[in-house]
Image: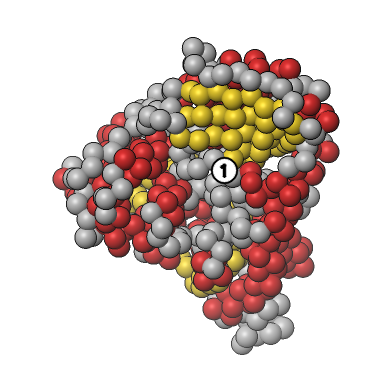
């Protein structure tokens, strides 16, 4: 069972707004996988998401440090798998501890974590649009706990204010 | 602590397993770094599982070598007086920031040695260690100096007012400078680590061909490199015929431009006597040349660390540990590693 919503954004601020729109859907133990090429706006989206959950410090890229934790409610662990190439290395990050402890885990370059978390996760695919500034964002709910929240996804797609994004929510 | 102030430092926070013996925070007696970069090159980046295992395998040999370099056996006693006193006065280790599994290897080793030798343990902030790295090679430097710390994980401007006393003036709000180098390098299909590859390729490119953006930030001493990275991708998508050399040169020009301009402004703001480079990006040849040139033009001294002091090492941890011990005493043995430790200033 899957549900999906899509949007397009014209500025980084609008991509942040999509992140902020995802924030209220999140609860303890949730995984969000961010998938998309370099410069697609993954960290930008997380900036909006963490700020919407009450984060005050700047959200910087965890590419080298691998994981940053923010004392938001719920707490967010922001992970980046760009430098990793093997599933065992993702296992070694011990993200289960954060999830069991009531946290939310947001994973950039999340395709590497799909075998572990892909069956029950919010998968956000970001891509380059037709212009330099445009980005396409597809939000896909996977697994029972996310399907029950699928109605919230249309609001997420509309969160990139003023964008021509089609908000199509339904069983996929 | 005895007058010689001899500190064993251990560093396992990320890519390198390292140990060093430093006297009074100034004199490097021995410094051993077991670089894992060959291992990583095969995987295109740091591999935590391998790195963690490698730290465990390498820590004792590296510590043993560092002690031997100081004339001490693995029990910490002089080769010439094996029944004499312990030849180490304190043990320092990096407690953060870094990977928890990697940090714990060094921290546990340091605590065990401190306990066995009955000397103080000092938990050191890795970033604070970098502040002392260049100073280790320039003990005559007059303070205050501005330190530009630029690496894969961090980009910071710090005012070093006195040994052990510093203020953070600015930091990156998104990507670190070294990360931008590595990401652009991989995007262009170059090798890892990307910094040296771009440095090399840029020599044959036209740095003025593409005017990449120099991002302004809300904090005048902050940095932002995310937009630059995106601008590079955007340009290459629109101009597939452009050469890697021209992109590398123009990109490097933009990064160095911003790093040097912010550091000069910071030095003027605090009335610094000089400026100092630290972190892996300090190995970049254009940055070194521009940095030296810009400060010389203002009559200020610039301190450019050797390659060994740019990258992660344990001598800087031992030096930072010495000054921290003087200032605030030992770290309790029940203190843990702190993966998200930040540099906030010493006061």
Q: Residue B197 at what x, y percent from top left?
A: 36, 61
Q: In this view, does B184 lie to the left or right of A21?
A: left
Q: Residue sitting at 78 percent across and 37 percent down?
A: A120
Q: Is residue B211 above or below residue B220?
A: below
Q: What quarter of the picture does the N terminus of chain A occupy? A: top right
Q: Is residue B133 above or below residue A9?
A: below
Q: Residue furthest bottom?
A: B80
Front-most of residues B210 and B81:
B210
Q: What quarter of the picture does the C terminus of chain A occupy? A: top right
Q: Is residue B13 left or right of residue B255?
A: right
Work out whether residue B161 can be spotted.
no
Front-most of residues B59 and B9:
B59
> Label 1: which residue?
A62
Instruction: Quadrant for residue A27, please give it.
Output: top right
Q: Residue sitting at 36 percent across and 51 percent down?
A: B277
The image shows a total of numbered marks equal to 1
Element marked by disc 1: loop
Front-most of residues B57 and A119:
A119
Chain containing the residue with disc 1: A
Q: Residue sitting at 73 percent across and 42 percent down?
A: A118
Q: Is residue B143 left or right of residue B326?
A: left
Work out whether residue B308 can be spotted.
yes
Q: Residue B182 at what x, y percent from top left?
A: 44, 53
Q: Residue sitting at 77 percent across and 22 percent down?
A: A149
Q: Residue A100 at what x, y percent from top left?
A: 83, 38
Q: In this view, does B38 lie above or below A142?
A: below
Q: Residue B61 at what x, y percent from top left?
A: 64, 77
Instruction: Quadrant for residue B216, please give it.
Output: top left
Q: Within 10 angstroms of label 1, few (less than 14), some, or many (20 or more) residues?
A: many
């Amino acid at each position: 069972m899957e549900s999906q919503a899509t949007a397009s954004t014209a500025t980084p601020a609008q991509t942040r707004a999509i992140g902020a729109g995802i924030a209220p859907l999140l609860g303890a133990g949730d995984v969000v996988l961010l998938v998309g090429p370099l410069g697609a706006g993954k960290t930008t989206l997380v900036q909006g998401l963490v700020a919407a959950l009450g984060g005050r410090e700047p959200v910087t890229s965890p590419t080298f440090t691998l994981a940053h934790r923010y004392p938001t409610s719920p707490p967010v662990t922001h992970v980046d798998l760009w430098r990793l190439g093997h599933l065992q290395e993702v296992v070694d990050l011990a993200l289960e501890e954060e999830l069991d402890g009531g946290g939310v885990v947001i994973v950039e370059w999340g395709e590497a974590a799909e075998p572990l978390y892909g069956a029950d996760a919010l998968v956000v695919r970001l891509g380059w649009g037709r212009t330099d500034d445009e980005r396409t964002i597809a939000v896909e709910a996977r697994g029972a706990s996310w399907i029950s929240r699928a109605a919230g996804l249309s609001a997420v797609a509309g969160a990139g204010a003023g964008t021509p994004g089609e908000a199509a929510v339904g069983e996929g | 602590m005895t007058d010689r102030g001899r500190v064993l430092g251990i560093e396992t926070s990320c890519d390198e397993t390292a140990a060093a013996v430093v006297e009074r925070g100034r004199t490097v007696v021995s410094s051993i770094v077991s670089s894992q970069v060959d291992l990583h090159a095969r995987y295109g980046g740091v591999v935590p599982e391998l790195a963690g295992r490698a730290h465990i395998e390498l820590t004792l040999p590296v510590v043993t070598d560092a002690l031997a370099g100081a004339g001490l056996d693995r029990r910490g006693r002089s080769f010439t007086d094996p029944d004499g006193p312990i030849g180490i006065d304190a043990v320092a280790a990096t407690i953060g920031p870094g990977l928890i599994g990697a940090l714990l290897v060094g921290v546990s080793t340091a605590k065990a040695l401190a306990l066995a030798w009955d000397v103080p343990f000092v938990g050191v902030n890795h970033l604070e260690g970098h502040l002392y790295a260049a100073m280790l090679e320039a003990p005559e430097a007059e303070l205050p100096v501005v330190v530009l710390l630029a690496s894969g994980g961090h980009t910071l401007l710090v005012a070093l007012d006195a040994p052990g006393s510093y203020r953070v003036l600015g930091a990156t709000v998104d990507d670190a400078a070294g990360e931008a180098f590595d990401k652009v390098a991989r995007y262009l299909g170059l090798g890892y680590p990307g910094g040296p590859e771009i440095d090399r390729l840029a020599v044959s490119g036209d740095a003025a061909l593409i005017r990449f953006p120099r991002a302004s930030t809300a904090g005048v001493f902050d940095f932002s490199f995310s937009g630059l990275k995106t601008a590079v991708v955007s340009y290459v998508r629109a101009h597939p015929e452009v050469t890697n050399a021209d992109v590398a040169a123009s990109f490097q020009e933009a990064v160095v431009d911003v790093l040097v301009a912010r550091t000069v402004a910071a030095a003027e703001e605090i009335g610094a006597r000089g400026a100092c480079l630290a972190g892996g990006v300090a190995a970049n040849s254009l940055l070194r040349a521009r940095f030296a040139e810009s400060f010389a033009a203002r009559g200020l001294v610039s301190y450019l660390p050797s390659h060994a002091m740019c990258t992660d090492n344990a001598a800087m941890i031992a030096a930072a540990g010495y000054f921290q011990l003087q200032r605030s005493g030992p770290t309790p043995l029940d203190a843990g590693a702190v993966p998200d430790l930040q540099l906030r200033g010493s006061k």
